[in-house]
Amino acid sequence: MKSIITGLALVALGSAAFTVQANTFGSNWNRSANKDISWTYVSAGYAKATLDNIAGNDVDMNGYQLKASYLLSDNWYLHASYYDVSGDLPLLDDIMGLEFEASEWQAGLGLRQSVSDNIDSFFEAAYVRSEVGVVGFENDAVNGFVAGAGFRYLIIPELELGAALRYGDGSDKDSSTYGDITLRYRFTPMFDLYVNYQFDSDASLLGTGVSVHF
């Protein structure tokens, strides 16, 4: 119940924040997208997921992730992501050779606003489908949605910090609220290196790779 309340509060506060900013910043709401904070890109890289306390042990899984974003207008953008990871199950791998796997994809719509010359705020929602299971057996699939609100802050022209709070809910699955932090280093106008960390009390996902901006 606490997670549900927190998640609904997040969505409400995100909507309220955009309403307040639209009234407060006026002309900023319709200003062109911040050219230094890119919202049109594709990313690919390494992913590591950790599940806490599975049969008394932590499960580490490794794989890859893909991300993409496309700015439709000054304020609206499409976004999508996918990751696929797998790893050995403690104890059972030694006895039976079993391996755990998980994958998830998201696709949705976002709303961004340039708050200042080096800060963009955003609110986004997406449909999500997750699958988990043991390799060689049928996976369990969960469909649902995720919503989030946060900001992207250009510390210096080459370095960007992003942070968001997200709420996810799905069929036959407990709701969850989790943090999302991203650090980007832009080494050319077209390419950057990123590190992304998503986490809650039971699981985490660490990703790192390269983004290509358009």
Image (cartoon, rainbow, N blue to C red):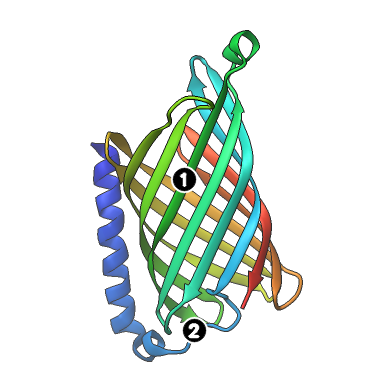
User: 21 and 73: which one is in front?
Assistant: 73
| Identity of the residue furthest to the top in this view | 95
User: 33 and 211: which one is in front?
Assistant: 211
Compared to residue 80, the image places residue 31 above or below, namely below
Residue 195 lies, in percent from the top left, at 64, 54
Question: Dot 2 corresponds to which residue?
Answer: 33
Is 99 on the left-hand or right-hand side of 6?
Answer: right
Element type at mark 2 = loop
- Give the image quarter of residue 125: bottom left
Residue 14 lies, in percent from the top left, at 32, 63
Tag 2: residue type? Answer: Ala
- Please tell me which residue is depicted at 51% across the width and 68% down the height of the picture: 69
Residue 153 lies, in percent from the top left, at 56, 69
Compared to residue 16, the image places residue 167 above or below, namely above
Say which mark, if any, is on residue 47. Answer: none
Q: Quadrant of the N terminus?
A: top left
Tag 1: residue type? Answer: Glu
Question: Dot 1 corresponds to which residue?
Answer: 104
Label 1 crowd bin: few (<14), some (14–19), many (20+), radius 10 Å: some
Who comes first in sequence, dot 2 or dot 1? 2
Element type at mark 1 = strand
Label 2 crowd bin: few (<14), some (14–19), many (20+), radius 10 Å: many
- Give the image quarter of residue 194: bottom right
User: 173 and 14: which one is in front?
Assistant: 173
Separation of disc 2 and disc 1 at Cα?
A: 29 Å
- Please tell me which residue is depicted at 50% across the width and 52% down the height of the picture: 180
Q: Quadrant of the C terminus?
A: bottom right
Q: Are marks 2 and 1 in contact (CB under 8 Å)?
A: no
- Please tell me which residue is depicted at 46% across the width and 39% down the height of the picture: 200
